[in-house]
């Protein structure tokens, strides 16, 4: 029982020292962790938030243009499908 309390106090003391900063061991661990994280992110081929947002905007503009073109094509198809009957009626008169 005494050992558990001692271990808890030791762990709490260590955590408090690390959390308060200024400890050279903690600073070294922090630098190493950041370096490892940066290295892992580089290998993952991720993009920055700014690049993601820019590409999202480009995609949205492209989608809007595509939808507008689809509507134009549909309108032209409707016009073409109606023209032969209209022309056929005028030629017979």
Image (cartoon, rainbow, N blue to C red):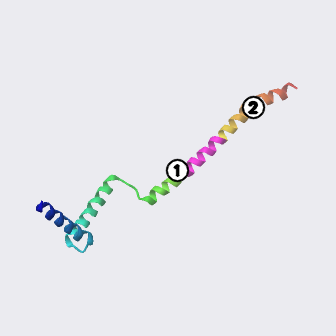
Q: In this orientation, which residue lies closer to the viewer: 22 or 11?
A: 11
Mark 2 lies on residue:
82
- The answer to whether 59 is drawn above or below residue 1 in the figure is above
Q: Position of residue 29 (x, y in %)?
A: 22, 65
Q: In this orientation, which residue lies closer to the viewer: 68 or 36?
A: 36
What kind of element bears circle 2?
Answer: helix
**In the displayed structure image, the side of residue 18 where residue 50 appears, left or right:** right
- The answer to whether 85 is drawn above or below residue 6 in the figure is above
Pair 2/1: label in front:
1
Mark 1 lies on residue:
59
Query: For the point 24% across and 69% down, which residue is it?
Result: 16
Give the class, few, some or many, for how many residues have Cα within 10 Å of label 2's Cα (few <14, many ≥20): few
Dominant SS in magenta = helix
Calculate the distance from the C-alpha at mark 2 to the C-alpha at mark 1: 35 Å
The quadrant of the rendering that contains the C terminus is: top right
**In the displayed structure image, the side of residue 63 where residue 5 appears, left or right:** left
The quadrant of the rendering that contains the N terminus is: bottom left
Lower position in the chain sequence, tag 2 or tag 1 = 1
Q: Position of residue 33 (x, y in %)?
A: 26, 62
Q: In this orientation, which residue lies closer to the viewer: 60 or 34?
A: 34
Q: Is residue 62 magenta?
A: yes
State which region is magenta: 59-71
What kind of element bears circle 1?
Answer: helix
Query: For the point 72% across and 31% down, which residue is it?
Result: 81
User: On the image, which quarter does residue 91 sit in?
Assistant: top right
Query: For the point 16% across and 66% down, which residue is it?
Result: 10
User: On the image, which quarter does residue 27 sit in?
Assistant: bottom left
Q: Is residue 60 magenta?
A: yes
């Amino acid at each position: 029982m005494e050992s558990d309390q001692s271990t808890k106090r030791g762990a709490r003391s260590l955590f408090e020292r690390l959390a308060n900063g200024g400890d050279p061991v903690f600073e070294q661990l922090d630098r190493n962790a950041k370096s490892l994280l940066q290295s892992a992110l580089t290998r993952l081929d991720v993009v920055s938030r700014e690049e993601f947002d820019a590409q999202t905007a480009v995609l949205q503009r492209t989608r809007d243009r595509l939808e507008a073109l689809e509507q134009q094509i549909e309108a032209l198809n409707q016009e073409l499908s109606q023209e032969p009957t209209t022309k056929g009626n005028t030629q017979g008169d």
